[in-house]
Amino acid sequence: MRANQVIVGSRVISFHPQVCLQSLSDPSAVNPQQDDKGANDNPPNTGDSQPENEEPKGVTFSWGIIMVRTKKLLNFLDDLAKYRIFSDIGWLYIGITIAAGAFMVWLMLDDVYRTLDSSLAFRCAIGAAVASQCHAAGVTYTSGPSLTSYLLLPGVNPYIPVLYGIIGIVVAIVVHEGAHGVIARRLKLPVKSTGLLFFLIVPIGAFVEIDEKLVQKIKARDSGRILAGGPGSNVIVGAVALLLLVLLLGGLVPHQFSGVYVFEIVSPSPANTLHLEGHLQAGDLITAVNDTQVTSSTSLSNYMANTKPNETLLVTVDHNNQLSTYNITLGTNPNNKSIGFIGISEVTSQELSSINSCYTTAYKTDPFLYLVVPGIVPQFNQIFLVGNQICGVPFSSTFTPLYSSPILGNLWAPVALALFWIFFININLAFFNAIPLYPLDGGQAILNWFSHFGRKWVENRAKLLTTICSVVMLALILTFILLPRILSLIPL
């Protein structure tokens, strides 16, 4: 089943389409008659599903892409297809695919509207902005994220880590293609071959070869389940990965500190001066001030309440279990000019518990939080507010050292990242593949729907109507990607 795949990333808890193409050939040319009852209720024949008069090459190479075909996995597909659940769950997959496609169309339309509404250049061009705004000096422009950020290519997209990106892509494509194959075999359609895809020596996915023309000729309810199998299974796998991630994070234990944990250093500040001298780093502990032990943010705040600006203190710093003392001249507290100011932000064990709780229960309050990719937006690597609750991404590089797992120890972080990218890539792949744009699964489903519409004038124009729909969707995607760049070129 051909599956050209595009992934959708996030913009401050929203999506952005990011492109990953997977082009699969489909040379099988068989055309058996289908018995609907038998297709739904009986398992497929477990014999060879390859037409005898065609024998594809075992290995093909083109433009760095290696396709390794094999029949060995066909028996595995047939074994899975013996279970009726794979035909019954196809109905659920159809609902998931319709909802995902509709959501993606709405999301892109909404983003285009918001881009136009927030663009000063556009508002000036249509006369919707005050003249003084349109000619103000020092106006900055944004052209959106770089084009490479739309590509689902680890190592090319600066936001996708190579190792975890490959893991997520391989899982997503294997699940996507495997679902097409299993449902097709359950409904007694022949599968010509299966195989693996490599870019040079790096595995990038898998494929299942089914005759697309044959899929369009069988009954709509059967072809619909086959086409929806890819996006639907990706959503299910993504949801399972997210559930496992939430369960893993729910068992984390925040570190207990024997001092004040330096979470961030304010610049400029007296603490930043120590930092520039190499004496203070984020992640250090302040254990004493003027030989008075401080064990929490509260005890440090109580001590600082009795200090004055320009006063010199002796602070004891624990860096990697090595204690050192330094003189520091206090600044002026921006919130109370009568007391001294060191210039650090702290985080406590209680706050770490709150941060983790916020993330693991976000499905109740703000599920879009799960689409925040650590590393893309700097503020999401720090503490931020969701409503009145402090929150953060516990497996971001900032917070990872501050938690431990009673079961996995320090291995919890790479496991969490792997689960996140499996979830993220599967969900994005499913949602974009559901868009009614041929040859994506959503586009093929639209063609199938028009071909079995029940009105001859529609069925006779199925390809034309599908082409019109695809052109509109392609225009919407290009507008989504290019509109910020076009608006940035409009002079004020």
Image (cartoon, helix red, strand yellow):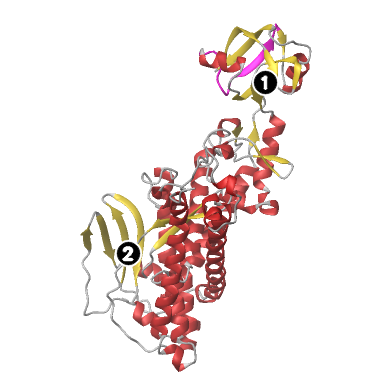
Is residue 42 among the parts visible in the rendering? no
Query: Where, by quadrant of the figure, is residue 174 drawn?
Result: bottom left
User: Looking at the picture, how far across and down is residue 130, in whole percent?
Assistant: 61, 50
Total numbered labels: 2
Q: 71 or 332: nearer the eye? A: 332
Residue 286 in magenta stretch = yes
Of residue 159 and residue 115, the one placed in the foreground of this image is 115
Element on which disc 2 rests: loop
Residue 303 visible in the current orientation: yes
Q: Is residue 191 left or right of residue 107?
A: left
Amino acid type indicated by mark 2: Ser
| Label 1: element kind | strand
Residue under numbered circle 2: 23
Instruction: Tell me which corner region of the image, top left, top right, bottom left or bottom right, holds residue 181.
Output: bottom left
Residue on which disc 1 sits: 260
Q: Amino acid at mark 1?
A: Val
**Residue 167 located within the stretch drawn in magenta:** no
Residue drawn where x is 45% and y is 62% of the image: 477
Where residue 34 appears, as percent x and y from the top left, is: 41, 88
- Tell which circle, 1 or 2, labels the residue nearer the N-terminal end: 2
Q: Is residue 241 above or below residue 140?
A: below
Q: Residues within 10 Å of mark 2 (few under 14, many from 20)?
A: few
**Camera-side residue of 358 and 44:** 358
Please state if 122 lies on the left or on the right of 367 as rendered: left
In this picture, which residue range is highlighted in magenta? 278-291
